């Protein structure tokens, strides 16, 4: 590999997102001068980025090398694997490859972005579909996951074979789809797997993740137990197998189905367009649902992660056509994603205050994870017998733990990498070669900008410390507006004192300094900030406006 990081006669791996974090998966394989991208995902913002909803991996490295990028292969349709496609696929300008269900969801995203027809989207057969692209030969290997058409990728290169798991689990009764069997995976291992690039999410779980088929019985028993009550089930919209189960549970318990949430409506439509959920019950509208006897309706709703605009949040706040009252039941058929605890707790407290019964996966087996526990990881190691293990899709603690499990299972080389690490997999001793630029971008309004850019940084400072606006008029006391400072009834006294401080500070300027707008501006800014610190214990951002002298300034 030359200093410009162009792959030579070698096999390279580079994660730009998804290593050291859960979400925002973007992986690159380099070989014979070319790059292949696997997945192009995003993550959702938290309090770290106020005013921002979506976070992306910084693709600067590959954007500078688009001539060498051959395509983007998508493993499955979760947002952390496809969510960034409509924002970057046009600029990258390479074909996309996906199985039918994933391709349908991606096509809708491209259509909304005005890119349908401008970005080539290739549909690959779901069951072991293949594509040859430059030095890479890629075969889709169906694996169970919490969405239809979850796939691993078997990537053949002149320098060795990679098994890239994507998100996966082992499930003998997956409800939807037919995962590759143990015998088939052992056969792949017998043919030779050089590198296993593997999901680390649930490595700390000492037990298998469990079967979707087992969830059917648990949900059936739980819904039947609450006869005569309205039952609402919240689950991940993308989990087509769970939707299939809930449709069957509704039918078996004599309930009609009402769907609340646009993402659920969209997934059901896409699933049925691609041959899934063909016997899903006809749904009823909100008015019909509310007019039925309470024990004859099963409501499926989005919002189990505490999303404030989702259906469950609005129902909990009595701001939705669907109404729940004391004694009704909400089943959380989903896991609590780390970071969402406070938001979920808020909704659960609102429901509890109204006497609504709640059941989570801690009380009943109404949810199983879509990611492998330690026994499943160890089984896959045994079946594939890889020479190299590269953990991905996890925080550093998850990836280090999986490397440890891999070493204990006899895998010769276990490489813990992070976003931006270029790893040579073959030939020769595998290991990290270099660190390249990586980072995060955010969608701020309609603009994609660096996550550490001035706008987000300033917004974070204002959120913590507040802001003061000072307008300086010639011959008059300055006008002062304090925003976000805990002054309350002290505000008039603060403003009066801050005005005096500002005038005194400006009055101390002598000679040329007194006539220099920049010096006047700085004296006013510092005086206002000192007054705020004295009165409120805060160091706010201060914006000074000087009509007729200089343009407004800010520090």
Image (cartoon, helix red, strand yellow):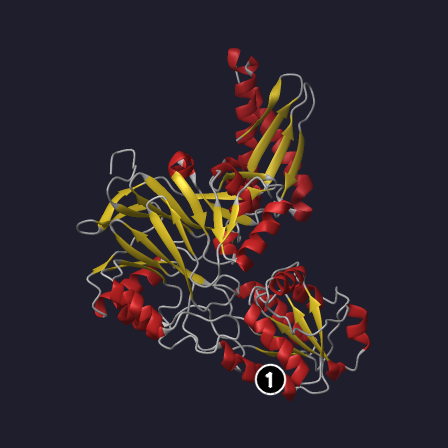
Residue 434, image quadrant: top left
Q: Is residue 475 above or below residue 144?
A: above
Q: Is residue 531 above or below residue 413?
A: above
Rendered residue at 42%/62% (across/down): 128
Rendered residue at 74%/77% (across/down): 325
Residue 489 x %, y %: 69, 47
Horizontally, is 507 left or right of 281 in the view?
left
Residue 341 x %, y %: 52, 65
Q: Is residue 398 above or below residue 481?
A: below
Horizontally, is 472 left or right of 457 in the view?
right
Residue lying furthest top in this view? 512
Tag 1, which secondary structure? helix
Horizontally, is 478 left or right of 431 in the view?
right
Horizontally, is 188 left or right of 526 in the view?
left
Q: Observer-nearest residue: 104 or 487?
A: 104
Rendered residue at 79%/82% (across/down): 293
**Residue 42, visible in the rendered structure:** no
Q: Observer-nearest residue: 249 or 306?
A: 249
Rendered residue at 41%/70% (across/down): 169
Residue 194 x %, y %: 25, 58
Q: Residues within 10 Å of mark 1 (few under 14, many from 20)?
A: some
Q: Quadrant of the N terminus?
A: top left
Name the residue beneath numbered marker 1: 220
Residue 34 x %, y %: 34, 40
**Residue 160, visible in the rendered structure:** yes
Count of picture labels? 1
């Amino acid at each position: 590999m030359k200093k410009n990081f162009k792959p030579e006669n070698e096999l390279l791996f580079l994660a730009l997102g998804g290593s050291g974090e859960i979400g925002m998966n973007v992986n690159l394989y380099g070989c014979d001068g070319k790059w292949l991208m696997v997945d192009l995902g995003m993550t959702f913002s938290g309090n770290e980025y106020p005013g921002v909803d979506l976070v992306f991996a910084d693709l600067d490295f590959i954007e500078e090398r688009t001539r060498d990028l051959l395509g983007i292969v998508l493993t499955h349709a979760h947002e952390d694997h496809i969510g960034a496609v409509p924002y970057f696929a046009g600029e990258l300008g390479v074909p996309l490859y996906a199985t039918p269900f994933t391709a349908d969801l991606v096509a809708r995203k491209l259509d909304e972005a005005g890119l349908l027809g401008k970005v080539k989207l290739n549909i690959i057969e779901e069951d072991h579909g293949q594509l040859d692209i430059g030095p890479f030969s890629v075969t889709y290997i169906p694996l169970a996951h919490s969405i239809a058409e979850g796939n691993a990728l078997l990537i053949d290169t002149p320098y060795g074979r990679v098994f890239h798991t994507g998100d996966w689990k082992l499930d003998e009764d997956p409800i939807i789809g037919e995962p590759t069997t143990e015998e088939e995976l052992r056969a792949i291992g017998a043919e030779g797997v050089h590198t296993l690039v593997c999901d680390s999410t649930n490595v700390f779980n000492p037990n298998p993740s469990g079967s979707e088929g087992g969830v059917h019985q648990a949900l059936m028993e739980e819904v039947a137990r609450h006869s005569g009550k309205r039952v609402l089930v919240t689950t991940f919209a993308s989990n087509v197998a769970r939707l299939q189960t809930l449709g069957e549970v509704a039918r078996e318990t004599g309930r009609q189905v009402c769907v609340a949430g646009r993402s659920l409506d969209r997934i059901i439509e896409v699933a049925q367009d691609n041959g899934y959920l063909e016997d899903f019950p006809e749904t009823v509208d909100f008015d019909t649902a509310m007019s039925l006897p309470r024990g004859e309706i099963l409501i499926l709703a989005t919002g189990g992660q505490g999303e404030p605009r989702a259906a469950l949040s609005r129902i909990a706040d009595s701001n939705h056509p669907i109404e729940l009252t004391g004694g009704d039941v909400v089943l959380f058929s989903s896991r609590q994603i780390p970071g969402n605890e406070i938001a979920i707790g808020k909704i659960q407290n609102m429901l509890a205050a109204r006497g609504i019964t709640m059941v989570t996966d801690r009380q009943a087996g109404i949810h199983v994870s879509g990611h492998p526990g330690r026994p499943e990881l160890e089984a896959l190691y045994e079946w594939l017998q890889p020479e190299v293990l590269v953990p991905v899709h996890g925080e550093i603690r998850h990836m280090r733990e999986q490397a440890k499990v891999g070493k204990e299972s006899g895998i010769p080389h276990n490489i813990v990498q992070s976003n931006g690490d270029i790893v040579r997999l073959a030939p020769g001793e595998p290991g990290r070669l270099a660190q390249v630029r990586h980072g995060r971008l955010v969608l701020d309004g309609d603009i994609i900008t660096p996550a550490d850019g001035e706008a987000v940084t300033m917004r974070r400072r204002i959120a913590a410390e507040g802001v003061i606006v000072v307008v300086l008029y010639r011959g008059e006391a300055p006008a002062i507006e304090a925003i976000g400072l805990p002054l309350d009834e002290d505000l008039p006294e603060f403003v009066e004192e801050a005005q005096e401080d500002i005038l005194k500070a400006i009055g101390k300027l002598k000679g040329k300094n007194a006539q220099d707008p920049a010096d006047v501006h700085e004296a006013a800014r510092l005086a206002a900030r000192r007054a705020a610190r004295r009165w409120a214990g805060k160091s706010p951002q201060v914006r000074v406006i000087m009509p007729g002298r200089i343009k407004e300034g800010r520090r």
